[in-house]
Amino acid sequence: MGGRGRVEPNPMVGCVIVRDGQVIGEGFHAAFGGPHAEPTALSASTQSPRGATAYVTLEPCCHTNKKTPPCVPTLIEAGITRVVIGCLDPNPNVNGAGVRMLRDASIEVDRVPDGLGAECRQLIAPFLVRQQFQRPYVTMKWAQTADGKVAGHEGMRLQISGDRANAFVHTLRARSDAIVVGINTVLTDDPVLTVRGVPAVRTPERVIIDRKLRTPNDCRLVRTALQLPTVVVTSLTAPSTNFEPLVERGVRVVWPPAQREDVLLAALAAGDWVQKPYSHVLVEPGPTLANAFFKAGLCDRLWVIHNSRSIEDASAPTAATVPDWFAKTGELSLGADTLIEYLNVQSAGYHATVPSADFTLAQDLK
Ligand code: AOF
Ligand code: ZN
């Protein structure tokens, strides 16, 4: 999990070398373009890996048209005699060919038990979703009061979560490729959607869903658009006069090919206008956008921050309801807040009811 935020769009992979029941080396893929887990674990081995078993969360790679040398020949040369894999690599250049190449070299290859295999797939769910469906992994996050409110009187901006919970949100932002908000959030909160107070692992693009192109030229997102990538996703019915002033200020304005909300959301999740593929999209929605994502089946994971205060104001907007098909995978107490993670068990990005890498890293930070 140490590679989270640094390896994407590649998967997180870990490897352990075991001989005579003893761990002699460990490694993980730490950064995009850098050494893979297997050579890292082999070079970290404290004893000769000859005759040892390599446990790898993903099938070792065997293809050569890429950044690093293939792992299968490296394992063979190191004298590994058994490889236990967590799951197959869906990359069409691998996808079972790594296993075959190992077996052809008389190396015993086994799979971990099914439950553990599902956990290995969950670890790389964003990679699997991208390989199979060409879309990023979508996380939604919101904060709510004890009485279920997400903003103040008549929707006025209200800081609900405390400093510790905010710091965790910023770690999640720092590992995401895009942060998405709806136009209502821009109009009421004027957010800047930057990563603050934590190391910036990636620079997320800031995306506004704005069907009628109402994004104000002087909002903070637009004012910082020359420094930080900013995209407005609009529709063909938007007034064209609003287009130029945004573009002049450095905003990329894009139109999915149809006007329907579901197409807009699907296009967003597919990130089909982005120059670089998105692996992780973080949506910070109001209740309307949250429900739209739930309805479109486009939310894979959810982080809800529950604050212990109530505001008891009937005019304050109420949080969306977490659908029944979301399974709770973690709970973390952070001062006056509790962070709860859910996974959408109906999504293609679901494999096992286990805390995500981001949640586990948050737990470790705590
Ligand atoms: C492994 N071990 O630790 C990882 C694997 O461009 P490259 O050389 O980094 O190769 C990227 C591909 O290798 C990636 O798409 C995936 O199929 C596999 N990732 N394989 O044996 C690793 N990270
Ligand atoms: Zn490899």
Image (cartoon, rainbow, N blue to C red):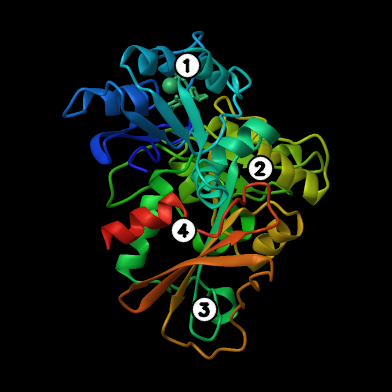
**Distance between mark 2 and mark 4 Cα atoms:** 22 Å
**Distance between mark 3 and mark 4 Cα atoms:** 31 Å
Query: Vertical placement of 46 versus 350: above or below?
Result: above
Q: Nearer the viewer, residue 27 or 146?
A: 27
Q: Nearer the viewer, residue 66 or 289?
A: 66
Q: Earlier in the sequence, mark 3 or mark 4?
A: 3
In what element is the residue under mark 1?
Answer: loop
**Distance between mark 4 and mark 1 Cα atoms:** 37 Å
The percent coordinates of residue 196 (x first, y second) are 32, 51
Query: Vertical placement of 303 versus 276: above or below?
Result: below
For marks 2 and 4, give the one nearer the viewer. 4
The circle drawn on residue 355 is 4
The percent coordinates of residue 93 (x first, y second) are 59, 17
- Determine whether the beta carbon of the residue marked 4 sits less than 8 angstroms from the nearest atom of ligand 1: no
Q: Amino acid at mark 1?
A: Ser
Q: Would you name the residue on which mark 3 appears?
A: 152
Q: Amino acid at mark 2?
A: Ala
- Determine whether the beta carbon of the residue marked 3 sits less than 8 angstroms from the nearest atom of ligand 1: no
Q: Residues within 10 Å of mark 4 (few under 14, many from 20)?
A: many
Q: Earlier in the sequence, mark 4 or mark 1?
A: 1
